[in-house]
């Protein structure tokens, strides 16, 4: 059911957190993995070691997904190492946390380029390596549909990302390629450490989640694995929310 033997998966931002969890989960099911990173080489190496313990191949590629030349070079490396790509997970994300009136054009463009436009570049550059049955996934957050304090650029870029997924799903569907979004609730990763009210956010999220606990990176990775399987063959252009019911509380 979840046999990914012979498959190759690229996870951008795969060195830590949700990206690392997805890389390991797919490797556990037999996939070889490409871990993309831009700054955290040590973390990326640790992820690769975990993948290789599972007797799967892991290619580390340093590339800024907002830079088209870097992305082109990354796919050249993937083509040389594996010759094909079956799963593309756009997980790399960034953005400044500031009140709306303090945002600059640079802040806006930075978040949009990394969180939204990067998926377009990844698909355009990666498509020649992909065939019918391939999967594309984007990792989003509830900030795409909710107003969260100081989250403006990230939230807006995630909303753009989800819209892009829907358009890609229409265009790539006839090629037999599934494109979907995974939207995660409050997940305690390194990214959340940048919020000054981190502890307050986590406590409130736990209290408001019907299932009584925070979403973990492994929970998100489980959904990624499901979307890679034949069981998800008719899921296309959708946002799959994994948050323990947090979003339904209004």
Image (cartoon, grey):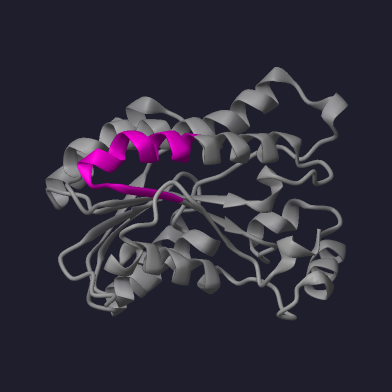
Report x, y in % for residue 32. Answer: 24, 64
Q: Quadrant of the N terminus?
A: bottom left
Q: Which residue is painted at 23% across and 75% down in the image?
A: 3
Q: Which residue is painted at 84% across and 26% down in the image?
A: 102
142 or 190, nearer to the observer: 142
Q: How many marks?
A: 0
Q: Which residue is painted at 66% across and 61% down in the image?
A: 185
Q: Above or below — where is 218 with respect to 82? A: below
Q: Is residue 169 left or right of residue 20?
A: left
Q: Which residues are magenta?
A: 164-180
Q: In the figure, residue 75 lies in which quadrant?
A: top left
158 or 191, nearer to the observer: 158
Q: Above or below — where is 230 with respect to 107? A: below
Residue 100 colored in magenta in the image: no
Report x, y in % for residue 39. Answer: 50, 46
Report x, y in % for residue 44. Answer: 42, 59
Q: Can residue 16 be seen at all in this image of the molecule?
A: no
Q: Quadrant of the C terminus?
A: bottom right
Report x, y in % for residue 20. Answer: 46, 64
215 or 70, nearer to the observer: 215
Q: Which residue is painted at 76% across and 42% down in the image?
A: 151
Q: Can residue 72 be seen at all in this image of the molecule?
A: yes
Residue 165 colored in magenta in the image: yes
Q: Above or below — where is 242 with respect to 108? A: below
Q: Is residue 134 left or right of residue 149?
A: left
The residue furthest front is: 234
Q: In the figure, residue 247 lies in which quadrant?
A: bottom right
Q: Main secondary structure of the magenta part?
A: helix
């Amino acid at each position: 059911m979840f046999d990914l033997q012979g498959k190759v998966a690229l996870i951008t931002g795969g060195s830590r957190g949700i990206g690392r969890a997805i890389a390991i989960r797919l490797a556990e099911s037999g996939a070889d993995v490409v871990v993309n990173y831009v700054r955290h080489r040590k973390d990326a190496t640790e992820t690769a070691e975990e993948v290789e313990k599972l007797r799967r191949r892991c290619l580390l590629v340093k590339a800024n997904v907002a830079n088209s030349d870097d992305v082109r070079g990354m796919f050249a490396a993937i083509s040389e190492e594996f010759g094909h790509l079956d799963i593309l997970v756009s997980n790399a994300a960034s953005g400044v946390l500031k009140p709306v009136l303090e945002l600059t054009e640079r802040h806006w463009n930075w978040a949009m380029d990394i969180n939204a436009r990067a998926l377009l570049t990844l698909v355009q550059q990666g498509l020649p390596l992909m065939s019918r049955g391939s999967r594309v996934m984007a990792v989003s957050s509830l900030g795409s549909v909710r107003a969260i304090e100081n989250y403006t650029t990230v939230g807006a870029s995630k909303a753009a990302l989800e819209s892009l997924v829907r358009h890609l799903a229409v265009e790539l569907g006839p090629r037999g390629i599934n494109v979907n979004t995974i939207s995660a609730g409050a997940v305690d990763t390194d990214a959340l450490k940048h919020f000054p009210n981190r502890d307050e956010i986590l406590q409130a999220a736990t209290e408001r989640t019907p299932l009584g606990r925070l979403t973990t990176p492994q929970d998100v990775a489980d959904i990624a694995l499901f979307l890679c399987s034949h069981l998800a063959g008719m899921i296309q252009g959708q946002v799959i929310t994994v948050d323990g019911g947090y979003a339904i509380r209004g």
